[in-house]
Image (tube, rainbow, N blue to C red):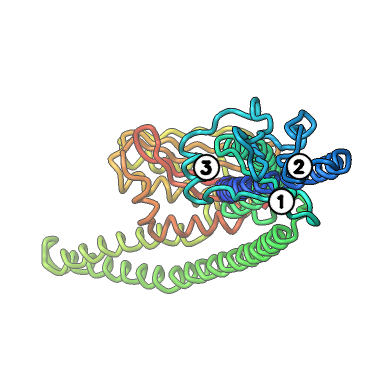
Amino acid sequence: MRLVLQLVARLLVIVALCLGAATVWATIDAYRSVDRATSASAERVSQALEALYWRELLLRSNRMREQLLPAPDWRTIETMGLIAPGICVQFEPAGAFERPLCGQSKGIGQAPPRWFAATVQAVLGDHATVERPISARATTAGAVRAIADPEAATALAWRHILDNIHVALLMALAIALLASLAIAHTLAPAHSIVSALRRMADGEYRTPLPRIRSMELAMIGRAVGDLGDRLAQAEEERTLLTRRLLEIRSDERRALARELHDEFVQNLTAILDFATSIEASAGDEYAAGTEIAQDARMISQATRRIIACLRDTLNRLRHPPAEELGLEASLVALVDSWRSRATQPQIQLDLQGDLADISGTVAVTAYRVAQECLTNALRHSSAREIVLRIERRSGTENALLVRVEDDGGGDAAKVAQSAGFGLTGVSERVAALGGSLSIARASRGLSVAATIPLAA
């Protein structure tokens, strides 16, 4: 829209400049039209007086030519009709009390402004006097001198300018209006292109565009479409690579879990047996409170703690319970395990929709999102209440929504920027399934929501 306004503003400036040039041209043309009218009036009156002169000379041959000057009865209505408005004609040589004969100057137009008369007078100067001989064969027949009346000539020029300016102004307005409509119609597809780019920025890469007739905009539209196709292809390839990476990571986790179980757990179990045996042997030979028995007991306790921690790590490395118990049962078990560890904060589980048939990668990803978000909310906030909401959305969305909200405050922008490995990992998992993860401000804390398409 701004581009249309800029182009229309430039067009109006051009129209204003053209209108000013038309005004100057109309002023000069009006000035010259008065000179042309003066010359034409002198020419017409001289021709009429030539006929009158020779007729009087032939009919009154007994009179001297000098007595015919000025020609008798030349100041008639017929002669006056030959004189243009605002032009005055005088016979030369002028007789006694001879006055110029002027054309009708009343009603030729309103009086022009003083600044206009002064400007024309200063820039273009006075009108020239035109003199025509009555007869080319008889130089003694006299002459006709025509000159423009300054006030009448200025009024005529002003009327001529107003007529031209009115027409030019109407044409300029019509051109500006039609050109503005044409520009707006031509640039209308630009809005569709911008909307397509915005949708591409939101992840809708394959965005169809309407047919564009303008060649330049059509080329831009095709370039945008090609860019969207390449981005969509790159996103699909990235999704496949991410899924493959997650599969490889899962395989590595299972392999690592097996190694830890086969090597560390067995060795730790052996250490625990040796420590127990040493403690029992020391208890038989010496008193129960000897140093050897105490050291063996401490080794046994430390080994048990290491084994418990290692088994918890193995549980996290192996497939989550979602693959074995199902999503709903695994989430209930996850919330119960956190509830059993501490009385605060209160954890609420809200399940909406049928979750029975959700399994596979979607169930594992949803479980991981809930597990990570609950862990972060419990460890990194002072929340008193945490709500875990799982919602299955059917219809056109056909997606699973996992949302964790707490009332522990926090800055959503800072959390999003400083997301650790855990949130980054679940974000990659969600993105690999074509979903999205968002961190936003809740009513009294933070809200982490993941949308996972069920079609994945």
Which residue, given by chain and number where applicable, does mark 2 sit on? 45
Helix, strand or loop at label 3? It is strand
Relative to 357, 47 lies left or right: right
Image marks 2 and 1: residues in contact by CB distance under 8 Å = yes
Q: Amino acid at mark 2?
A: Val
Instruction: Compare marks 1 and 3 and give the one earlier in the sequence.
Output: 1
Image marks 1 and 3: residues in contact by CB distance under 8 Å = no
Q: CA distance from mark 2 to mark 1?
A: 9 Å
Relative to 371, 133 lies left or right: right
Which residue, given by chain and number where applicable, does mark 3 sit on? 402
Q: How would you rate the neighbour count of disc 1 (Cα within 10 Å): few for under 14, some for 14-19, many for 20 or more? A: many
**Foreground pick, 312 / 48:** 48
Q: Residue at x 24, y 70 (%)?
A: 278
**Visible residue check, residue 158:** yes
Q: How would you rate the neighbour count of disc 2 (Cα within 10 Å): few for under 14, some for 14-19, many for 20 or more? A: many
Which residue, given by chain and number where applicable, does mark 1 sit on? 132
Frontmost of labels 1 and 3 is: 1
Residue 86: percent from left, percent from top: 64, 35
